[in-house]
Image (cartoon, rainbow, N blue to C red):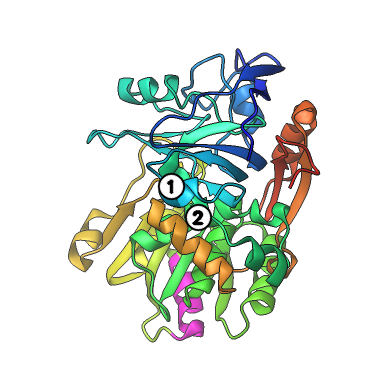
Amino acid sequence: MEIPPSYRALQFTSPSAPPTLTTLPTPPLMAGTALVRPLRANLFAYTRDIFTRGNPRGYHFPTPLIPGSAAIARLIAASSDAPTLSSSSGALVYIDPVIRAADLSHTQILHGLNSGPSAAGKALAAGEWRNGSWGELVRVPAENVHLLDEAVLLHELGYTLDDLGYLLSLMITYGGLRDVDVRPGETVLVAPATGSFGGAAVHVALALGARVIAMGRNSEILKELQDVAARAYPGSKMAVLGMAGTVDENVEAIKGAARALGSRDGTVDVYFDMSPPSASQSPHIKAGIAALRPKGRMSLMGGAAGDVGFPYYQIMVKGLTLQGSWMFTPSQIDDVIRLVETGRLKLGKVAGVECLGVFELDEWEKAFQVAGDGGRVGRFALFAPSGKDAL
């Protein structure tokens, strides 16, 4: 594909001021890099908080900035030291939003979104990876480009580019579930399961062949998840639970659901936690740990603010593993792509997944609103940085 001399992008100079559409020169193709044309770029439900409401979450990013992390894109060109990519110009690709330092510092940032507070992270975000996917073009590390089988995804399976926008949510939760080695036939508690990522974890656990207990406060969404499980994953075993008022009440409810799914002693093998910032004192966390079997595992992927009290003695006596996970690894991205391309992990209507809107860059205000007001299980909004009709 021809490399354009310049490109349009949405640029922010402050987290409390509106952005501007600007034109920038195309960055040079360097060793170990690729140039891609974003077709669909992800929006988080809290995007407007970060970039237009003063950034109350305290994300760290340089300004001026072209935000944007994960994207479905067209590969324009890649450096010759990435031969598979350099010979695949025009291919449909997924862009990994996690930029990893090339040294041994283990520094990681979310491209165009958050560098974290460390000096190393800030330096990485302010350098050649400063600008993200909310533009007609972006330069990324070659290792962040993952080839997609367009013929299978868009033609054999009948998905759209919009459907592929759900891949990020699935990959994030797959990372946490894979890190605790969820296996077919195991019982997995997802709590809470009614948020965007908790709901995605239900999908992934079912696709991996696990029995799932989905726990949350919104009975309507829990019913929707149960309907999706029956439709998208026939033969799967799933139970839904409302959250109770005390730890003991929650433990008894979890044990009852586990027994109904076939657990003889009422325990669960894995507890996947995606608790929001406000949930640090919620009784469901201790209850989930208490319901784990001996040698059970807990995956921590949420954002509970402050310290959380853990039942120390139970963790010690039962030999439990508490595994924190942040995002995913490159190999886990490829795992999810294979699960989707083979039909094991579902997207689109059959999975109860719906894109609420696709917006061009000059529609940023509406895009932020829809993403924030409508974001929940299986509901999301997307940017079309290269135009809605671009393929």
User: Where does the image place residue 29, in percent across and percent down from the top left?
Assistant: 48, 30
Q: Is residue 83 left or right of 315 when viewed as pictured?
A: right
Vertical order, 65 against 327 (above or below): above
Vertical order, 146 against 264 (above or below): above
Provide the residue designation for mark 2: 171
User: Mainly helix, strand or loop, the magenta region?
Assistant: helix
Q: Inspect the image, locate mark 2, and give the three-letter code of the amino acid beneath it.
A: Met
Asked if labels 1 and 2 touch by Cβ distance under 8 angstroms, the answer is: yes
**Closer to us: 91 or 124:** 91
Q: Quarter-wise, where is residue 67 in the image?
A: top right
**Closer to us: 25 or 383:** 25
Q: Quarter-wise, where is residue 56 in the image?
A: top right
**Quadrant location, the N terminus:** top right
Provide the residue designation for mark 1: 327
User: Where does the image place residue 11, in percent across and percent down from the top left?
Assistant: 64, 19
User: Where does the image place residue 341, in percent across and percent down from the top left?
Assistant: 57, 68
Q: Earlier in the sequence, mark 2 or mark 1?
A: 2
Q: Inspect the image, locate mark 1, and give the three-letter code of the amino acid beneath it.
A: Met
The residue depicted at 64 percent of the width and 68 percent of the height is 152
Structural crowding at the residue carrying mark 1, measured as other residues with C-alpha within 10 Å and reported as few (<14), some (14–19) or many (≥20) = some
Q: Is residue 280 visible?
A: no
- Range covered by the magenta-colored residues: 251-262
**Closer to us: 378 or 363:** 363
Q: Is residue 118 left or right of 140 when viewed as pictured?
A: left
Q: Is residue 127 visible?
A: yes
The residue depicted at 63 percent of the width and 54 percent of the height is 166
User: Where does the image place residue 113, in percent across and percent down from the top left?
Assistant: 52, 30
